[in-house]
Image: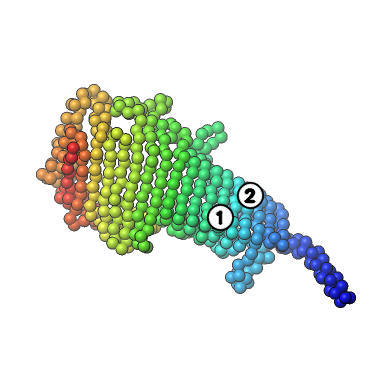
């Protein structure tokens, strides 16, 4: 019995000793972290608070001054852990966490984050939050980078994994004074440059005090975003804005809620833009893009809008409603690029549709596409195999000719006949004038006279490659024979 009491007393004493030592350990750890963070002479921290039981750390009034300056009112991390791989290398957390060090945490929150880059401008993020954060070690030294803030952000995203990333009240102000902002951005299933889903709300571009933003966007949603190539480019020291970025992978995207002063000025409305990509194995990709609900109805204010309104009224139009859809595919195994159909359709106006096939899409071509460098296309063997342009007139041709006639003071019938006559007499400079070209121009002229559906096809044999472009620059090429161009007219 006495032995039990002794053990109980020893247990209580041990618990009390541990409880009393925790605050001391927390203060000691906080002091060590603060000293380590400020040891480089370029960082300051107002206060550090450590809770060992919840494995949490809170920093207030944080400032890091390097090639770019980062400040935060509050930095809080809960559920902290330290990667085993770092322990095996002899890296321990109590030596202090620095930008570029790894970080594991259940939750990280940063309040009032500001990033200033003297060369480009400054970012402000009201709230930045990560859930289930896993940040790998990365090189945060961007002193020699051409765009330090961009390079730092790209390197961080390359090393970042998180179940969820949320930002609120984001704004960027360029050195020039241009400004754009977002209400919120949410990324889910982020893994080393890949994003499972993206939701962006409240984009405002060109806003200023007392002035409506030039352009606004209510919402952008996306799935299957792959940023590996652009992040690799932006993280390089040589990269500058405007340099090639590389291909962005995207499975689905939807953009809705367009507005702003620029659209109001010209009377433009737009419902949505959507995009979808599907894969058939690793080498075949099919894509579909659509622009829905485009309406042009210029208001009776502003010189440019009035001019556009007068032109449309001369054509008998109060508004123009347009739809656009494009379907295509690329097949790396067959070395083909296909635009199955890209069509611009105007309600009661007409339709313009294009389709084409490119063959010989070799490794040099895919490298140019993947790296986003158009100059690399000059070294490819890609060639045009076929193309078709279809112009289906419903009323646009007649409306356009009536507008031209009104502007020139001629009757519409005279304008139509004169336009057809000029097309028949047209002789392209430095091009061989053949019977086939004359026939082609006559078909186009009959389209002007009669309307209907004009189809222009090109079927070069052999396919017309980039290596033949120099031939087009030489005097007198026979374009019709070279490209296999024909035209037909249907009523």
Depth check, front residue: 252 or 435: 252
x and y, in percent, of residue 23 in the image: 78, 61
Q: In which quadrant is the C terminus drawn?
A: top left
x and y, in percent, of residue 81 in the image: 64, 64
Seen in the image, is 107 located left or right of residue 149? right
- Badge 1 marks a residue whose secondary structure is strand
**Residue drawn where x is 35% and y is 60% of the image:** 280
- In the image, residue 47 above or below residue 426: below
**Residue drawn where x is 13% and y is 42% of the image:** 439
- Badge 2 marks a residue whose secondary structure is strand
Seen in the image, is 161 located left or right of residue 293? right
Q: Which mark is residue 376?
A: none
The residue pinned by badge 1 equals 164
x and y, in percent, of residue 199 in the image: 50, 48
Seen in the image, is 389 located left or right of residue 179? left
Seen in the image, is 323 located left or right of residue 31? left
The residue pinned by badge 2 equals 111
Q: Is residue 310 visible?
A: yes
**Residue drawn where x is 57% and y is 51% of the image:** 166
The residue sitting at the left extreme is: 435
| Mark whose residue sits in front, 2 or 1 | 1
- Of the two numbered discs 2 and 1 on the same chain, state the one appearing first in sequence: 2
Tell me the CA gap for discs 2 and 1: 17 Å
Depth check, front residue: 253 or 135: 253
- Give residue 282's quadrant in the image: bottom left
């Amino acid at each position: 019995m006495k032995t039990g009491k002794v053990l109980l007393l020893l247990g209580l004493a041990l618990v009390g000793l541990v409880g009393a030592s925790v605050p001391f350990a927390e203060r000691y750890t906080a002091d060590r972290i603060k000293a380590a963070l400020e040891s480089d002479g370029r960082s300051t921290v107002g206060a550090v608070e450590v809770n060992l039981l919840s494995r949490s750390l809170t920093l207030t009034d944080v400032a890091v001054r390097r090639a770019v300056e980062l400040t935060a009112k509050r930095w809080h991390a809960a559920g902290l852990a330290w990667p085993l791989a770092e322990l095996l290398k002899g890296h321990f957390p109590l030596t202090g966490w620095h930008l570029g060090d790894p970080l594991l945490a259940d939750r990280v929150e940063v309040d009032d984050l500001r990033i200033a880059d003297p060369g480009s401008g400054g970012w402000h993020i009201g709230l930045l939050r990560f859930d289930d954060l896993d940040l790998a070690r990365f090189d945060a030294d961007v002193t020699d980078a051409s765009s330090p803030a961009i390079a730092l952000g790209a390197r961080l995203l390359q090393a970042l994994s998180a179940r969820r990333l949320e930002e609120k009240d984001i704004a960027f102000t360029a050195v020039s004074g241009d400004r754009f902002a977002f209400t919120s951005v949410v990324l889910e299933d982020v893994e080393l440059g890949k994003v499972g889903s993206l939701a962006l709300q409240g984009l405002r571009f060109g806003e200023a005090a007392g002035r409506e933003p030039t352009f606004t966007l209510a919402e952008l949603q996306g799935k299957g975003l792959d940023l590996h190539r652009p992040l690799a480019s932006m993280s390089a020291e040589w990269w500058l804005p405007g340099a090639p970025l590389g291909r962005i992978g995207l499975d689905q995207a939807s953009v809705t809620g367009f507005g702003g002063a620029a659209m109001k000025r010209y009377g433009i409305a737009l419902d949505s833009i959507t995009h979808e990509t599907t894969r058939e194995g690793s080498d075949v990709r099919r894509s579909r893009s659509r622009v829905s609900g485009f309406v042009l109805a210029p208001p009776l204010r502003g010189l440019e809008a009035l001019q556009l309104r007068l032109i449309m009224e001369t054509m008998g139009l109060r508004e123009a409603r347009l739809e656009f859809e494009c379907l295509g595919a690329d097949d790396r195994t067959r070395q083909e690029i296909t635009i199955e159909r890209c069509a611009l359709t105007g309600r009661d106006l007409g339709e313009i549709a294009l389709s084409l096939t490119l063959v010989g899409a070799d490794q040099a071509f895919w490298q140019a596409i993947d790296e986003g460098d158009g100059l690399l296309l000059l070294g490819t063997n890609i060639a045009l195999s076929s193309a078709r342009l279809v112009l289906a007139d419903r009323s646009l041709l007649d409306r356009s000719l009536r507008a031209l006639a009104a502007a020139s003071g001629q009757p519409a019938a005279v304008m139509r006949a004169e336009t057809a006559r000029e097309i028949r007499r047209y002789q392209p400079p430095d091009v061989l004038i053949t019977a086939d070209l004359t026939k082609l121009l006559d078909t186009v002229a009959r389209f002007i006279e009669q309307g209907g559906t004009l189809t222009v096809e090109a079927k070069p044999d052999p396919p017309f490659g980039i290596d033949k472009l120099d031939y087009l620059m030489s005097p007198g090429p026979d374009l019709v024979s070279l490209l296999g161009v024909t035209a037909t007219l249907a009523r």
